[in-house]
Amino acid sequence: MKDKRLVDKETSFRKALQRRSEPEELVEAIAGYLKVSVADLALLKGERRDIVVYILKTCTELSNKEIGEYFGGLSYYDVSKIKERFIGKLNKERALSKKIDKIKKDMSIVKGDPDIL
């Protein structure tokens, strides 16, 4: 459950707490977790690419188009479908959900609940 303070429009720095403002830092952290170079992230396929797309979409302000360009030309629709399918996978696979929670927790500027991101 998300912290009510992060939903309340009166909370100072609500957006800053919800989202990482620097996608580059996030990309570096994801690359480290997946044990690939930052340059190789854009070449990933399958579940590892889906993890990167999902985290960039949910933890940054990047648009689908910007994320797609990072991956060498995925359309905004492709990015949307990847995220949608990945959410379905997260709901079915507890181990994958725990992996994502760990990645988010490790990258979070606010330690604790991974739902804060």
Image (cartoon, grey):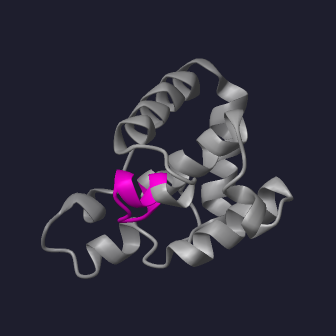
Count the marks: how many? 0
Residue 63 part of the magenta segment: yes
Residue 101 part of the magenta segment: no
Q: Position of residue 51 (x, y in %)?
A: 62, 44
Instruction: Residue at 49%, 79% (x, y): give it.
Output: 22
* Rendering quarter of residue 94: top right
Q: Is residue 58 left or right of residue 33?
A: left
* Rendering quarter of residue 108: bottom right
Q: Is residue 4 left or right of residue 116?
A: left
* Rendering quarter of residue 61: bottom left
Q: Main secondary structure of the magenta part?
A: helix
Instruction: Residue at 43%, 52% (x, y): give it.
Output: 58
Can residue 117 be seen in this snapshot?
Answer: no
Q: Position of residue 107 (x, y in %)?
A: 63, 67
Q: Residue furthest top?
A: 92
Q: Position of residue 83 (x, y in %)?
A: 46, 37
Which quadrant, please, contains the N terminus? top left
Instruction: Residue at 46%, 51% (x, y): give it.
Output: 68
Q: Residue furthest left?
A: 10
Q: Position of residue 47 (x, y in %)?
A: 69, 34
Task: Write the start and end of the magenta stretch as one range.
Answer: 58-68
Query: Where 16 sits versus 52, above or below?
Result: below
Please name whichever residue, 69 or 93, is drawn nearer the observer in this view of the structure.
69
Instruction: Residue at 57%, 53% (x, y): give it.
Output: 71
Please name whichever residue, 64 or 6, is drawn nearer the observer in this view of the structure.
64
Can residue 98 be seen in this snapshot?
Answer: yes
